[in-house]
Amino acid sequence: MAFDPAQPQHQESGPLAGPRLDMLLLEYGVCAMSAAIAHFGTLSRAILFAAAARACGPFEAAPVRAGRPVSVNALAASLRRPFETTRRNANALIAMGLLVRSDGGLQMPTQAITDPRAAAFSDACHDLLVRLIEDVRASNLALPAPRTDIAYDPRAGVGIAFDLLLAGFECRDGDDRNLIRIALLTAIEWANARFGGRLDGTRQLAPVKPSMIARTLGLPYATAARNLDQLVRDGALERSPDGLIVPRDQLSSVAATDARLALGNRARQLLGRLAQAGFPLHQPALGYIRARPPLPALG
């Protein structure tokens, strides 16, 4: 059920909001989290890398050569993650050569952007953002007018792609900051919506098998199953004979509605920044670093 990219003609645009945008933002998040796990081995390590990259500055149109320092405390607070967990992941990134210690805190050396793992992850997130824009345009949703007086620098797009990935976690409220469970919920909500209905619950949502979700995210099945069992016990998911589904009362709750609105608002801000960076929003296919990424196969 792949989505056709934008055709050369483009009809009159509607507001950049609503269930279609919500689903596409979920799709971006699921695929970016899958890329994170594929290239860093763990989601928490990749998310810390993205947060440190945004704090320290190398993924910008005019990167900060010396690098801005950031403390472990600041990173933990920004991600709403335990200090010790953040410190362990920071030490792992230091061992990988992607962070260095300085008197002012942690810094990301500019050469980190050429590390094969970091480069593959950043390219993947960038091209997933471009795919999102293609699909937004194909859905006849309004996009901001891009600046035409500057040349687009993909480093700016990578930074915005990281911001959108991080926003998917930041906009979800609640005390449970288990990244794997957030990823699983996001993936199931996306699959339910794309293959069965809409986020507002006006159509039947399609259940999805745990094995398909584990495969989509690149998680070991045992890890996915253990966390899915906990989400079912917590009432965040329901089991049916055909698979898992996010309950309708969860989708229509105040917290879920607020999270969708917050992510939509953040996405509009980020696409506005991308337009100001000179990205060709009306010809998005020109912006790919590699190529349009395929959608996950859930069949």
Image: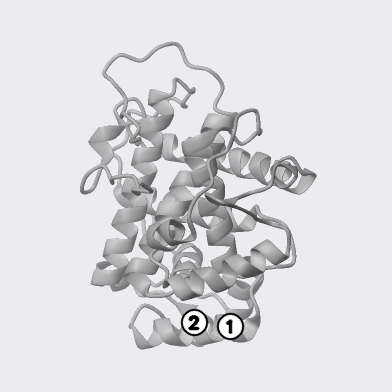
Residue 92 in sight in this render: yes
| Residue 57 x, y percent position in the rendering | 43, 63
Q: Is 255 placed left or right of 141 in the picture?
A: right
Residue lying at 56% horizontally and 37% vertically, measured from the top left: 22
Q: Tell me how far mark 1 sits from mark 2, CA to CA.
A: 6 Å
Residue 89 shows which numbered tag?
Answer: 2
Residue 150 x/y as whole percent:
32, 36
Residue located farthest toward the top when viewing the structure as drawn = 12
Tell whether 298 sits left or right of 200: left
In the displayed orientation, state which residue is furthest to the front: 241
The disc placed on residue 33 is none
Comparing 165 with 294, the one in front is 294
Residue located at (61% from left, 86% from top):
84
Residue located at (39% from left, 55% from top) = 60
Q: Nearer the viewer, residue 92 or 236?
A: 236
Q: Which mark is residue 85?
A: 1
- Mark 1 crowdedness (10 Å alpha carbons): few <14, some 14-19, many ≥20: few
Q: Given the image, on which type of amino acid does mark 1 rest?
A: Thr
In which quadrant of the rendered view does residue 276 lie? top left
Type of amino acid at the residue the image marks with label 2: Asn
